[in-house]
Image (cartoon, rainbow, N blue to C red):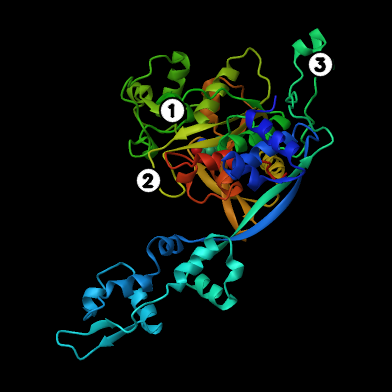
């Protein structure tokens, strides 16, 4: 059934050939908008009523105009405030009403008052005429009565200029009967339910037509952070290249795997608390593959496998210290060690993309935690050319074709290369990553066969993400200043490959 208001409207349409919604509103004592709403819902039910839009202009009084009706015009009020005998000091007259100033000037120019400037103690205002006609008030009252046409145009303009009246446009509808007119209208069904189908009642029902212009409901869903979107793209590239993802689910690592296994001497400055976050509780890791640990100790302190080592007293205490991993190469070390324990070596291609931590000075491009993307390939007889080749293949998939390499140093790779790519926007070479061939001092103690070499590279995830999404301050990407709207509204990521 149409609601009660709808039924009232239908009755009025039935009684009158045609009726305006403004009139209906006044008959029913309702707000016009409410009538329009009810008409719209009647229209959705079918051709019950026909509507024709009307646009009516009429004049209304402003707040100030209404004051005139109540108290008289400002000028009349001022005139009345002047005593008929004697007069009043101008200063006192101004205090008689808030609009005295404007009223005074109108009354003066109408010739109702005169001013005696010679009086002692300041100017005195006196009546000039014994009676007045408050024309402004009567005109405003005419407008209120809908008889603006009786006012001469020039005076009408004056009322507008004085902001006593305004023109308002009311959009309304002329209602007439539609082809399906009836005094009671049943509501159309919006859903076809299983019950209607099983009982067969759908045959008797009227269904609401589809509204293809209706806006859909936004599906409620979570939103991936831009870093996670870009990570998915990098992961896809690695997978396409036949790489396997390494398990990176341990932020806490021992110094052993983070540094010692990588042939990084214990006095190395990166192992300082200024660069690395050490864990207080539990301060030490306890489980190590002891035979391997002995070989690591030996290669650091005495050398071996053709190396002189670092020649210092290697301490297990230092190796046991827990820390937040400073690079994902710690994960690669664990995986390579695991690989070396297999009965028979087989070549592998591994990758990881996860979070690392460094005790850095924070600025617009550095945070104490960020993500590293790392690729590792282990096989017999891999050389620098293989590394350069795989880097070209990898970066080509990112749409980066121009690469340059610069000799660098890492404690665990020899040779090592920084990777630069030509940035078309900045028109210069920018560093995009670091790479190298893992040292025998790292691989042989693990038990990997002689002749197997491992090439690897690493890059940051934040940098390409910031470029991709045009974010120039990393604090807008990570941390408490992240705008969730930004996360919600950023599009899916497609690296230009
Ligand atoms: N671990 C290096 C870094 O943190 C990156 C790297 C990975 C370098 C693998 C060489 C080989 O910058």
Please state which of the two labelled residues, at mark 1 or mark 3, is closer to the viewer. Answer: 3
**Quadrant of residue 125 in the image?**
bottom left
On the rendered image, what quadrant is the N terminus found in?
A: top right
Nearest the eye: 385 or 107: 107
CA gap, disc 3 and disc 2: 70 Å
Name the residue furthest bottom.
Answer: 118
Nearest the eye: 273 or 181: 181
Q: Secondary structure at mark 2?
A: loop
Residue 418 position, x and y percent, is 56, 47
Q: Is residue 292 left or right of residue 31?
A: left
**Residue position marked by numbered label 2 in the rendering:** 361
N-term mark: 1 or 3: 3
Determine crowd level at label 3: few under 14, some 14-19, many 20+ residues with C-alpha closer than 10 A.
some
Determine crowd level at label 2: few under 14, some 14-19, many 20+ residues with C-alpha closer than 10 A.
few
* Above or below, comparing residue 75 to residue 192 in the picture: below
**Residue position marked by numbered label 3 in the rendering:** 202
On the rendered image, what quadrant is the C terminus found in?
A: top right
Q: Secondary structure at mark 1?
A: helix
* Residue at disc 2, CB closer than 8 Å to ligand 1: no
């Amino acid at each position: 059934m149409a609601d009660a208001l709808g039924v009232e409207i239908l009755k009025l349409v039935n009684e009158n050939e045609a009726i305006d919604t403004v009139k209906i509103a006044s008959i029913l004592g309702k707000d016009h908008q409410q009538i329009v709403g009810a008409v719209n819902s009647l229209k959705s039910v079918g051709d019950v009523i026909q509507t024709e839009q009307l646009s009516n202009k009429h004049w209304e009084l402003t707040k100030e105009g209404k004051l005139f009706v109540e108290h008289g015009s400002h000028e009349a009020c001022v005139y009345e405030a002047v005593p008929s005998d004697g007069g009043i000091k101008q200063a006192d007259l101004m205090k008689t009403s808030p609009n005295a100033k404007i009223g005074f000037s109108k009354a003066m120019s109408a010739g109702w008052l005169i001013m005696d400037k010679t009086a002692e103690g300041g100017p005195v205002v006196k009546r000039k005429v014994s009676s007045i006609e408050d024309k402004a008030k009567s005109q405003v009252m005419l407008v209120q009565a809908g008889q603006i046409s009786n006012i001469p145009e020039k005076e009408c303009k004056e009322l507008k200029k004085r902001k006593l009246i305004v023109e308002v446009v009311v959009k309304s509808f002329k209602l007439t009967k539609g082809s399906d007119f009836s005094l009671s209208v049943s509501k159309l069904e919006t859903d076809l339910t299983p019950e209607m189908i099983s009982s067969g009642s759908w045959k008797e029902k009227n269904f609401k037509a589809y509204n293809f212009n209706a806006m859909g409901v936004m599906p409620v869903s979570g939103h991936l952070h831009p870093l996670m979107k870009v990570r998915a793209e990098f992961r896809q590239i690695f997978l396409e290249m036949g790489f396997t993802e390494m398990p990176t689910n341990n932020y806490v690592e021992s110094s052993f795997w983070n540094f010692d296994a990588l042939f990084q001497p214990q006095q190395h400055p990166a192992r300082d608390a200024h660069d690395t976050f050490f864990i207080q509780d539990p301060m030490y890791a306890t489980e190590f593959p002891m035979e391997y640990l002995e070989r690591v100790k030996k290669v650091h302190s005495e050398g071996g496998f053709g190396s002189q080592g670092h020649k210092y007293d290697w301490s297990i205490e230092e190796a046991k210290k827990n820390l937040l991993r400073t690079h994902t190469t710690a994960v690669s070390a664990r995986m390579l060690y695991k690989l070396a324990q297999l009965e028979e070596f087989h070549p592998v291609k591994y990758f990881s993309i996860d979070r690392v931590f460094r005790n850095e000075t924070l600025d617009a491009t550095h945070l104490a935690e960020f993500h590293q993307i790392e690729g590792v390939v282990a096989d017999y007889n891999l050389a620098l050319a293989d590394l350069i080749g795989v880097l070209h293949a990898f970066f080509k998939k990112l749409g980066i074709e121009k690469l340059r390499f610069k000799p660098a140093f890492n404690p665990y790779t020899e040779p090592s290369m920084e990777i630069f790519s030509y940035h078309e926007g900045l028109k210069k070479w920018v560093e995009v990553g670091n790479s190298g061939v893992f040292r025998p001092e790292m691989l042989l103690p693990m038990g990997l066969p002689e002749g197997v070499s491992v090439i690897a590279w690493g890059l940051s995830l934040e940098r390409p993400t910031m470029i991709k999404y045009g974010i120039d301050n990393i604090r807008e990407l990570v941390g408490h200043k992240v705008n969730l709207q930004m996360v919600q509204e950023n599009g899916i990521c497609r690296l230009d490959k």
